[in-house]
Image (spheres, rainbow, N blue to C red):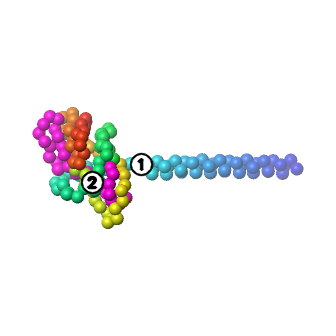
Amino acid sequence: MKIIQLISDSQSSNNNYYFLNSMIAALCFTMLLSCLANKSSTSEIIIKKYIISDSIYYKINTAEIINNNLVIEIEYYGNKKDEFDLLFSGKYKKSYPPIVNLYLDQKIKSAKKYKLKKKLTYNLNKIKYPNTESTIIYLHNYNNALKYNH
């Protein structure tokens, strides 16, 4: 009888152990998915000549520089699949600190248009002017200049 009770206690302990491990694994998996869903990817600035479009379907609500990144929050008419490129002509206005103009270009992926919000992040390393400590950024369709200290 004692042997049966020991085996029963051992099986109960193993079941608790497997249940606990399963719960820990499920919690870790859920946390990983949450981190991946909230991760904001950083895009590179594209250096090329551009023409400013007459039709702009977005409004820049905020723009700020965090570390070496320009973080832009926008409202736009479009589709969730729309992409936004940040364009820089490669030209600096002669001043101290130097001035750059950047243009946010919306790549429309669908004719369906919804009012949406999005946070965009762009790495600013490509616009650093040599031998200077900062660059002034003018973002087309945004009222405030931004000072990028690098």
Residue type of the residue flagged with mark 2: Asp
For the residue carrying disc 2, how many other residues have a C-alpha within 10 Å: few (<14), some (14-19), or many (20+)? some
Mark 2 sits on what residue?
85
Question: Which of the two residues, 128 or 137, is positioned nearer the viewer here?
Answer: 137
Question: Which of the two residues, 22 or 70, is positioned nearer the viewer here?
Answer: 70
Write the residue at 43% across / 48% down. 38
Q: Earlier in the sequence, mark 1 or mark 2?
A: 1
Residue 24, how many percent across, how many down?
60, 47
Residue 31, how many percent across, how many down?
52, 47
For the residue carrying disc 1, how many other residues have a C-alpha within 10 Å: few (<14), some (14-19), or many (20+)? few
Location of the C terminus by quadrant is: top left
Whether 79 is among the magenta residues is yes
136 to the left or right of 23: left
For label 1, the SS is loop
Q: Residue furthest left?
A: 94
Residue 140, how many percent across, how many down?
22, 48
Q: Residue furthest front?
A: 115
Q: Which mark is residue 150?
A: none
Write the residue at 20% across / 49% down. 88
Residue range highlighted in magenta:
74-102
Question: Which of the two residues, 99 or 28, is positioned nearer the viewer here?
Answer: 99
Q: Residue furthest right?
A: 1
Mark 1 sits on what residue?
39
For label 2, the SS is strand
40 to the left or right of 50: right
